[in-house]
Amino acid sequence: MTMGDLKRISLGSDHGGFELKELISSHLKEIGHEVLDRGCFDPGPVDYPDVAALVCSDLLSFTADLGILVCGTGIGMCNAASRLDGIVAALCTNEYMARMARMHNDANVLCLGGRVTGTDLALSIIDEFIEAIPLQDDRYLRRRDKVRGMG
């Protein structure tokens, strides 16, 4: 990884993703990324839409380059984040999905399930998501624009 590859990553979870979020934070810092931890900060109950809004706000204000959200399954966080204009959230369960989410769908938020995704796999998915080259091909740009126009 070169210095140009370093990213500011906004990270958040609800109680179902708290343990995995803590491991993700350590991993990201270890490999040189800046982490903006938006909670939760303990395993007590928290409403996932509130955390998703904080992380997505970082992206929309250009405070962060990418976002990562973790809840029990990843579904709730993905649904909440996807409601916001300018956010393309992707629930990924393997590295290929993470790479394609960035390259073909222009995803800027990765969602993971803390209760359904093993730690090693989760970290591998994250690395792939961060390192993937963002959307560039005209075919995918055209399709992305069509999706944006559907709202």
Image (tube, rainbow, N blue to C red):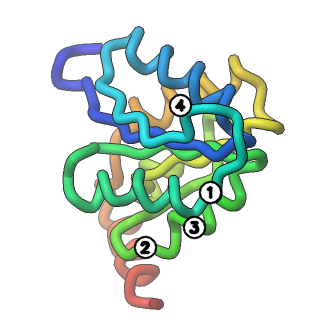
Q: Residues within 10 Å of mark 1 (few under 14, many from 20)?
A: many
Element class at badge 2 = loop
Residue type at mark 4 is Ile
Q: Nearer the viewer, mark 4 or mark 2?
A: 2
> Circles 1 and 4: CB distance less than 8 Å?
no
> Circles 1 and 2: CB distance less than 8 Å?
no
Q: Residue at x 49, y 15 (%)?
A: 26
Residue type at mark 2 is Leu
Residue 97 appears in the picture as rendered: no
Labelled disc at residue 84: 2
Q: Residue at x 64, y 46 (%)?
A: 14
Element class at badge 1 = helix
Q: Residue at x 76, y 45 (%)?
A: 72
In this rendering, is residue 59 above or below 49?
above
Q: Earlier in the sequence, mark 1 or mark 2?
A: 1
| Residue to which mark 4 is pinned | 126
Q: Earlier in the sequence, mark 4 or mark 2?
A: 2
Residue 83, image x, y percentages: 51, 75
Residue type at mark 3 is Ala
> Circles 2 and 3: CB distance less than 8 Å?
no
Residue 7, image x, y percentages: 28, 31
> Circles 3 and 1: CB distance less than 8 Å?
yes
